[in-house]
Amino acid sequence: MKRTVRYTVLVLIAIINSLVITTSLYAVLPYNELHQLNMSNGLVDNIITCIYQDQDRFMWFGSTNGLSRY
């Protein structure tokens, strides 16, 4: 009986710890803003076939109609 109570308490402590850790990690994550890109924003095509980020942090979007850099 004591083993069952001890095991239950340990499981509850583990669950509470994991909840506390995940919520505190979520609080320190940076806010990322998403932007939608399309032909009205300057893309050469709305269908993108490849994406690449270079060492200068530019994003390159390739399509069958050309290449766009952001």
Image (spheres, helix red, strand yellow):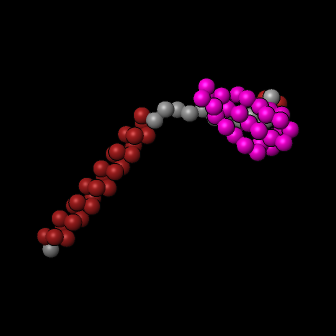
Q: In the image, is 36 to the left or to the right of 5?
A: right
Residue 13 within the segment the image draws in magenta = no
Residue 44, horizontal then vertical, whole percent: 83, 34
- 66 drawn magenta: yes
Q: Would you place residue 13 above or below residue 49 in this image?
A: below
- Report the side of 3 relative to 38 (left or right): left
Q: Furthest residue to the right?
A: 65
| Rendered image quadrant of residue 40 | top right
- Quadrant of the frame with the C terminus: top right
* 57 in relation to 22, above or below: above
Q: Specify the farthest residue to the left.
A: 2
In the image, is residue 24 above or below residue 19?
above
Residue 68's image quarter? Answer: top right
Q: Residue at x 19, y 71 (%)?
A: 4
> In the picture, residue 42 is in which quadrant?
top right
Stretch in magenta: 43-70
**Which residue appears farthest toward the top when viewing the image?**
56
The residue lying furthest to the front in this view is 55
Could you say where residue 39 lies in the image, as x and y percent from the top left?
Answer: 83, 33
Residue at position x 46%, y 35% from top?
A: 29
Of residues 66 and 48, the one nearer the viewer is 66
Question: Image check: 36 left or right of 24?
Answer: right
User: Residue 27, how many percent across, how many down?
Assistant: 42, 36
Residue 48 position in % (x across, y down): 77, 42
Query: Residue 16 vs residue 9: left or right?
Result: right
Q: Residue at x 65, y 28 (%)?
A: 58
Give the number of callouts.
Answer: 0
* Front-lying residue, 11 or 65: 65
Q: Nearer the viewer, residue 57 or 25?
A: 57
Q: Looking at the rendering, in which quadrant would you find the N terminus?
A: bottom left
Residue drawn at point x = 32 percent, y = 56 percent: 15
